[in-house]
Amino acid sequence: MKVSRRVFLNMIAASGFASGIPAVGQTADAQKKTFATVLDKALIALIADDNTCERIANAGFSGVELRKKGVSVTQALEGRRTAEKHGIRIHSLMGGGADFNNPDPEARRRSIETMKQRLQVAAAYGASTMLLVPCRMGGVVPKPSQFKIDFDPQTLRVTSVVEGDNKPFAAYIEAQNKATELTRDAVNQIIPTAAREGVIIALENVWNNLWVMPDFAAAFVRSFDSPWVKAYFDLGNHVRYTPTEQWLRTLGSSIVKMHIKDFKIDRTKKNDGDFVPIGKGSVDWKSVRGVIDEIGYNGWVTIEENSYTDAEYSGIMDSFFAGQDIVPGNHS
């Protein structure tokens, strides 16, 4: 396949090497004193208008991930121009949740077409990725601490999800297998659009009860065997299943982007804990930064919570990137 210059640059930009020049407010020198990798900090916003981009730039961030749906290509091009005027990179678009496991073929077709359109919008923004949550499911599922998934590494079919008796989870196992089958088909249908537009499909799990363990999630992402399908990994989303460090080591080079939030494990609670402000949860941030360096990840880390001011988040990210402890209240 012939790769255009725009596509090539977008693939490089996904890993944070687009310019080779540290972005405004980024503590690249501080990172390089300790680590071989350099991370870029970003915020999430609805749109890229003047007020938003100016606010983000003034807080010392160099990038933004946008989340508004229903944006046209023309509007995205205008947003890109506005962001660039303020020295901000729109690095990703939140494509949202797909309906790939819907039993209705027409519903799946509509969802596939929607994601194709959003890939075009992401390209117009100049984004190197589009975050995609493939599908969700409910029903009777194991508690996070119970999961021990046994699956076929070739077919990805799950045979059990806990040790011992799996009869209570028979419907869940069947639904998981169906979701994997339908999602693989749907994503394969949108890969050609991703390749044409030069935008990587960044698959993310967002408490959707699917692909919840590191080895299974990694096998799922890699099953597409495509440079246009990678993992969007949230550093706090899945610590209730297994430590963030294990997720990072297992997903490894499959990770194209990262979100950051924190989670406090409490196995007595309904969801095995609660999301808490960064620095107040169960994630060992100094250890996590070391493992990010270990796996060789360079690129964007985007804040996905609303506990601090932009300026406080900027300081928190600088500390994290430099391998220092995150101490809430010490950043202003």
Image (cartoon, rainbow, N blue to C red):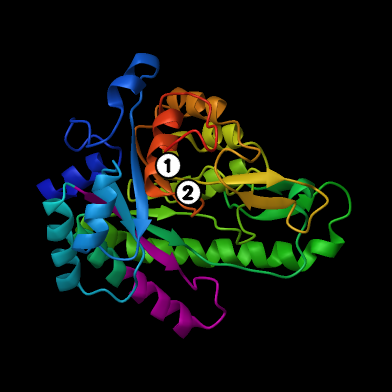
Q: Are discs 1 and 2 less than 8 Å apart at CB?
A: yes
Answer above or below: position of 249 versus 148.
Answer: above
Q: Amino acid at mark 2?
A: Tyr
Magenta span includes 105: yes
| Residue that carries the numbered disc 2 in the rendered image | 308
* CA separation in Å, label 1 and label 2: 6 Å
Compare residues 98 and 81 and report the one nearer the observer.
Answer: 81
Residue 163 is situated, as x and y percent measured from the top left of the image, at 83, 46
Judged left or right of residue 33, residue 145 is: right
Considering the numbered disc 2 on the image, is that residue within a helix, a strand or a loop? loop
- Residue 128 makes an appearance in the image: no
Q: Amino acid at mark 1?
A: Glu
Left or right: 257, with 103 as reference point: left
- Choose between 171 and 276: the one closer to the eye: 276
Near-viewer residue (26 or 166): 26
**Residue appearing at x 72%, y 51% in the figure:** 273
At 34% from the left edge and 21% from the top edge, which residue is drawn? 30
Residue 176 is situated, as x and y percent measured from the top left of the image, at 65, 62
Q: Which contiguous range is marked in magenta?
A: 88-116
Residue 72 vs 227, above or below: the answer is: below
Answer few, some or many: residues within 10 Å of disc 1's Cα (few below 14, many 20 plus, some between 14 and 19): some
Above or below for 228 versus 20 = below
> Which numbered disc covers residue 46?
none
Most extreme residue toward the right is 165
Q: Residue at x 48, y 28 (%)?
A: 289
Q: Is residue 306 visible?
A: yes
Q: Which mark is drawn over residue 312?
A: 1
Q: How many marks?
A: 2
Which quadrant: the C terminus?
top left
User: x%, y% of residue 303?
Assistant: 43, 48
